[in-house]
Every structure is written in C-alpha cells, then in structure tokens.
Image: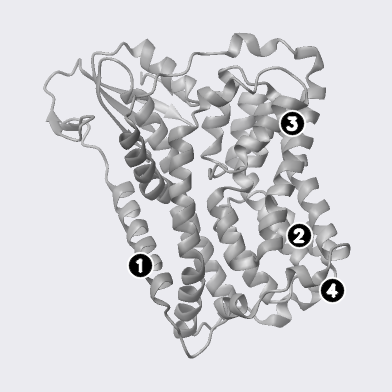
Amino acid sequence: MNINFQHFIYALVRILNDMSPYILLGFILAGILHVFVRPSQMSRHLSGRGWKPVIKAALLGIPLPLCSCGVLPTAIALRRQGASKGASTSFLIATPQTGVDSIAATYALLGLPFAILRPIAALAGSVFGGMAVDCSEKDKANSSATDVIAAAPHMSHTFSGKIKEAVRYGLVDMVASVGKWLVIGLVIAAIITVAVPDSLFLSLSSHPILAMLVMVVVAVPMYICATGSIPIAMSLMLKGLTPGVAFVLLMAGPAANFASVILLRKNLGNRATAIYVASVIITALIFGIAIDYFLPSSWFMLSGKQINAGTAACHLELPVFSTACTIILIALLVYSFYKNRRTPHQNACTCSKDNKCETSNDNDMLKIYNVKGMACAHCKATVEKTVNSLPGVTSATVDLSAGTVTVNGTAAPAEILAAISAAGFDPSVPE
C-alpha cells in the first residue's frame, strides 16, 4: 500500500480543522452534563417497569458523551441504585451511539441529516431494546430489589467550583477517555482517503445490503468511538460506499464490543445481553436501508467543503479559528496521553485531594484494592472521585494498567469496597 505522506498529512489536518471546534464544544458540554446530572439523580426516574423509564433512560443517555466502555460502570451503577433492567438496557444502547460531541462532529463532517438521524436511531433502538428486555423479565419484576446499593457520596461544590470541575472533566478526563480512539479514527480516515483506491469499494457499493451486513460483522466486535467513527464513515463514503452503509458503521460500531458484552452478561444476564446486541444491529440495518432506499439521496450528499476535508490535495488552507481549535485539541490530547502514562508511586508518595504530595510511612494507612471493569480514563476518574469522596480517605489513585486503586486514609475497607461496587465496578482486596 503506497501512501503519499504529504497527502496523508493534508487530509488529516483538513479533517481535524473541520471537527475540532465542534469537538471542543462537545467536550465542554460533556463536562457540564457530568457535573450537573448525577447517576443518583437519574436513577430516581428509571425504576419500575413500562415504557416511561425506558424512554427516560434513552433521553438521558443520548446527550451523554460516554463510550461503550465508559458507559458500562454508569449503567451498572444505575441498575444497582434501582433502575430496571429495561431502563438500564435502554441507557446502554442510547449513550455510546451518540453524545453532544459526536452529534456536533457528525454535523461538521457529514451534514445535518446524519446529525438528526443519529439520535433518532439511537432513541428507536434503545426504546425497542429496553421494552424487549422488560417483556422478557415479566417473571422477575421484583428481582432487582436486592441489588440496590446506596450510591457513594459526592463532594459538594460551589457553583464556581462546579464550573471549574465541568471544564476540567470535559477538557481533561473526556479528552483522555475518547482521545485515543479519536486519534485512531482520524488516522484510519486519512489512510483510507489517500491509500485505498476507489475501485476497491465499487463492487460493494452496488450491493448496499450486503455491504451493511459486512459492516456489522466488522464493526460490532471491535471498539469504535462514536466520535472517532465519523471520519471513517466519511472516508468510506468518499470511496464509493453508500450513506446507509456509513450510517450502519456510525450506529453499530460504538454501541457494542467484546469487552462490553462480557461485562453485560455478568451484570444483566444472557437474555438481556442478547437483546441488547440484537437491538443495536437491527436498528442500524433498518435505518441504513431506509437511508439508501427510501430517503432522498440529495440529503446525504457530501458538500464541497466536506469532500475537500476528506481528499488529499497539493494545497492546504489553514483558517485561523479552526487551526487554533485544532492546536488546542492536539495540546489536550498530548497532555492526556502524558497523564495516562504516569503511574502512581504506590509505596512512596500519594497525591492528596488538594493535589499536594504526601509521603506515608504507615503501611496500615495505605491499602491497594483490585478493581475489575476499568477500561478508560473515564473509569479511572469515576473510581478516584468515588473513593476520594468517602470520609477518612486522604487520597485515592488508580493505576489502569494494573487494575488497582491505592487508597491512603482511615476509611474502612468495607466502605471502600461498597462505594466502588456502587459505582459499577467489581472491587476486591488482594490476597
């Protein structure tokens, strides 16, 4: 595969310039949602059976910019706080498929019809899946009562403190959570743009339904971020695949992967997990077919600006505002990657809640817990914030690579284990 490096860089920069203003806006909105909409607040509306909690879960999940691994602890926590299986499934389907950041980026690269249909499809699929799980659980309507665990307390903030936390979460934690997959998506899109010949997709483009089935087989097992899938979908359309096939990638890819399916089987059961995966696939195919066969093709034609963003050329324009947003986004990505590579000095130094470094000589004050289910920076931030909010905890630091959290303080191990469990993870004390 022969790649012109200059054309690759040009294509990558064009795509970045078109997406970066919307992505930054989405990250900030994500922080606001994270701070002002708590899982404990949501769970009050998601208990009980019927269509109301299912629809509420879908509507609450659609704007939240969580990936398919980041949404798992949130959904499990909702389940343990009293949300029904149907509502939990609805939340699981709707949330990773969309988000304020991915909707904004979809509009930037693929246009308004795609940006409108994406949350509509997420709503339809999540309601269908949630109701199907509810109907399959008729004989277990009261089974969740014993699963309810009190949520871990949250640190209180003033309004200005909440705004600072929202900006910090959006531009640090969220960037760290989806940044890796966003970069992968952008690189793949640029490679497709400059290296894949148009003729490769000509045979599939004449058989859209077959192409959609192939896309499902490829996209569902692997992890594709909702935002990172957008430039890939655009590049595939530029190579000849239909808008319906691109839409299947946008909906099926972010919603499921092997890791999420395994964890869901443990927490929701085989039946609910099967319904979850089937709902994602069926909804993506139905909307993909509708786009290709029933909706006006003119709605989904890429504009000249979008085509220029996805095609390599010998000339590169750098608008001031878009370029500034791209530079800021790249700086945030570099910082998040650097931050994620840092490992805690578990036996020498820990960072307290006020970010001051403290050395502990009392081994009884320092405890390490195994935590299963952590997969990204969002998971890391959730565990650290949950444990740090407990009385008696001086500091809590997560090591993602080791799957552990190091806790310094006098809080009882049982309280720490219960808080982490209530947050949606599986903690244990090393033997």
Q: CA distance from mark 2 to mark 4?
A: 14 Å
Q: Which mark is residue 206?
A: 4
Can residue 204 be seen in the rendering of this structure? no
Pick the residue in front: 50 or 255. Answer: 50
Who comes first in sequence, dot 2 or dot 1? 2
* Amino acid bearing label 2: Val
Q: Which mark is residue 214?
A: 2
Vertical order, 20 against 276 (above or below): below
Amino acid beneath label 3: Gly
Dot 4 alpha-carbon crowd within 10 angstroms: few under 14, some 14 to 19, many 20 or more: few
Q: Please give the residue where the numbered disc 1 appears in the rendered image.
A: 327
Label 3 or label 1, whichever comes before in sequence order: 3
Residue 267: % across, % down: 61, 24
Q: Position of residue 417 (x, y in %)?
A: 40, 17
Precedes in sequence: disc 2 or disc 3: 3
Q: CA distance from mark 3 to mark 4?
A: 35 Å
Q: Please name whichever residue, 390 or 358, is drawn nearer the observer in this view of the structure.
A: 390
Kindly identify the residue that appears in the image at 36 percent across and 29 percent down: 385
Q: Are marks 2 and 1 in contact (CB under 8 Å)?
A: no
Number of marks: 4
Q: CA distance from mark 1 to mark 4?
A: 40 Å
| Circle 4: element type | loop
In the image: residue 45, left or right of residue 360: right
